[in-house]
Amino acid sequence: MMPANYIAERNVEDVQQEFIRKFVEAKPKIVSFVDTCLGWNKAGEFLRFFKGSFNLSIAARNCVTNERAVIRFPIPGKVYDLWRVKKVKHEVMVINYLHEHTSIPVPRVYHWGLTKESPQQLGPFIIMEYMEGENLGDILKKPTPNEADLAILDPDINETKLNGIFEQLASFILQLSRLEFPRIGAISKDAVSGEWTVAEPPLTYDMNEVVSFAGFPAEHFTTMPVFDRSSDYFAARAQCLQINLETHRTVAYDTKDITWGRYVARHCFAKLIPTYGMIDDAGPHRLFCDDMRPSNMLINPKTMEITALLDFEFTNVMPAQFAYDLPWWLILREPGIELSEGEAAKQEFLNLFEPRKEQFIHAMERVEARSARPAWEPLLSARMRDSWDSGRFWFNLMSRNSVDVDQIYWQILHREGLGDAMLDTVTLEGKEEFLKRKEAQFKAYLAEKQSDTRFNE
C-alpha cells in the first residue's frame, strides 16, 4: 500500500466536517425542497439521514401517500470539488440507461440539478426513489462483536442461500457485460436524437482518490481523451501511475529498496500491456461499475431477493476485459489489502477466494444456460475463468487501483528475471536521482506536517 498523506487526509476531513454541519442545519430546507420538487403539497417530512463513502443523503416521506424519496449530495473533499457536478451527471445517465436496457433493480431518478438550484447552495444533487431492503454486505459477513472489524464472508453461511444470491448477481453482471459501446468514457444521451453516446472522458474512483488524497495534479485529467482502443487506455493509465508516484509526497516513508520497487512496478505495468491489455482492443467496449459490491446492494432478508443496486457514480464504458473479470469482492475482502499483509495473508486470501471463485463461475454457468445469447458470443463464465487463470484479473485490478500497484505486481505478476531487467538503460541510470527527489519531497512533507497546528492538538 502507498503510505498515507495525513495532510491531505486532514484537509479532506476538515472540509467534510464543515459540509456535514451545514447539511444537518439545512435539514428542514432540504425536506421542503424535496416536497416542492415532487409536488407533495407540503406533506413532506424528514425520515432519516444516510452517510456513504462519497455522499450525504436525506430520506423524506409524504405523510399523506407514504411515498418516499432520497435526496443525495456529493461530499466536498471526499469528491474533488470540480468533479462534483460531473459525478452527479454521470450517475444519472448510467441509472437512466440501465432502466432502459436492463432488468437490474436500480432507483429511478425523479430530479437532479446543479448547485445553484439546490437548497442552501449545498451542491449538485439527485432526488431518487427510496429503495427497500437491508444491506447485502451485512447479510453476507461473518458476525463479530466489534463493528469496526474488517468484513469477511461468513464461513458458516447457508450455501443454498449464497448460491441464490450469486445467481442473481451473475444475472446482473451478465446483463452489464452485454452493454456495448464503440469508445471508452462516460455515457450520455443526446437531447435531440435520443441516442446514447460516449462523448466525455471517464471519471473513475481511482482518479478521484489520487487527486483528493495523494496530490495528483487534477489538471492532467482535463486533457484526457475519450479512448478508441483498450491499449491506448492502459498506456494512459501507465502514465498516470507514474505521475502518481512522482507527486505522492510520502513515498520515501519506506526504505530505498521499497521506494525503487514502486518505480519498477509502474514501469513494468506498461511493459505488461501487450500481454494482458489487448483483449477486444478495438472494441466493442463494455459498461463497467467500479464499485459494484455487496455493501452497495439491498436485499429482502425474508425472500433473499436483491432489491436494489446503488452507487453508480464511477461507472463508465471501460475496456471490455474489465467486464470479463470475476467480482473481486467474493469473500468481501479487498485483494490489494490482503496482499499488502505479506505472503501468509496472500495465501490465506487465495485459499478462501478459490472455492468462492468456482462457486460463482458455476452460478454464472447456470444463469447462462437459461439466457439466450448469440451463437458467436463466448460464455462469460469461460472468460472469467480465463481472466483468473491467465493473471489478467490481477492486471486489470492493478490498472484500476493506484494504491495496489506494488503488491499486485511483486506478489502476483512479477516473474524471476524481470523487474530491473525490464527497464531500459536510461531509466536505470535515473535511479539515484529519483530516490533523492523522493527523499527531498518527503522531508518537505514532514516539515509541513510538523508545522501544522492541527497535528499538535
Image (tube, rainbow, N blue to C red):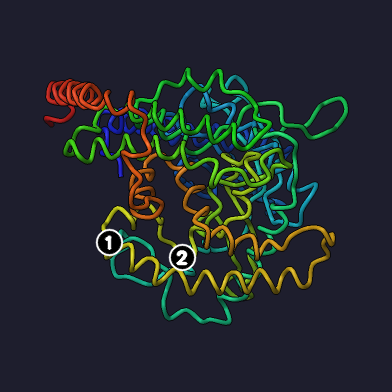
At horizontal 15% and vertical 26% (from top left) the residue drawn is: 446
At horizontal 60% and vertical 61% (from top left) the residue drawn is: 384
Q: Which mark is residue 138?
A: 2
Q: Which residue is mark 1?
A: 343
At horizontal 64% and vertical 72% (from top left) the residue drawn is: 363
Structural crowding at the residue carrying mark 1, measured as other residues with C-alpha within 10 Å and reported as few (<14), some (14–19) or many (≥20): few
Describe the element under mark 2 as helix, strand or loop.
Answer: helix
Where is the N terminus found, in terms of image quarters? Answer: top left
Q: CA distance from mark 2 to mark 1?
A: 28 Å
Q: Nearer the viewer, residue 338 or 408?
A: 408
Q: Nearer the viewer, residue 64 or 191?
A: 191
Above or below — where is 413 with respect to 239?
Answer: below
Find residue 46 and report its image quarter: top right
Q: Earlier in the sequence, mark 2 or mark 1?
A: 2
286 sits left or right of 4 in the view: right
Above or below — where is 228 with respect to 323?
Answer: above
Hey, what amino acid is under mark 2?
Asp
Structural crowding at the residue carrying mark 2, measured as other residues with C-alpha within 10 Å and reported as few (<14), some (14–19) or many (≥20): some
Q: Position of residue 449 (x, y in %)?
A: 17, 26
Q: Position of residue 370 (x, y in %)?
A: 78, 72
Q: Can residue 153 be seen?
A: yes
Find residue 153 and report its image quarter: bottom left
Q: Position of residue 434 (x, y in %)?
A: 25, 24
Q: Position of residue 213 (x, y in %)?
A: 35, 32
Hey, what amino acid is under mark 1?
Glu
Q: Which mark is residue 272?
A: none
Find residue 185 and report its image quarter: top right
Above or below — where is 252 with respect to 131?
Answer: above
Above or below — where is 407 with respect to 79?
Answer: below
At horizontal 45% and vertical 21% (from top left) the residue drawn is: 218
Describe the element under mark 1 as helix, strand or loop.
Answer: helix
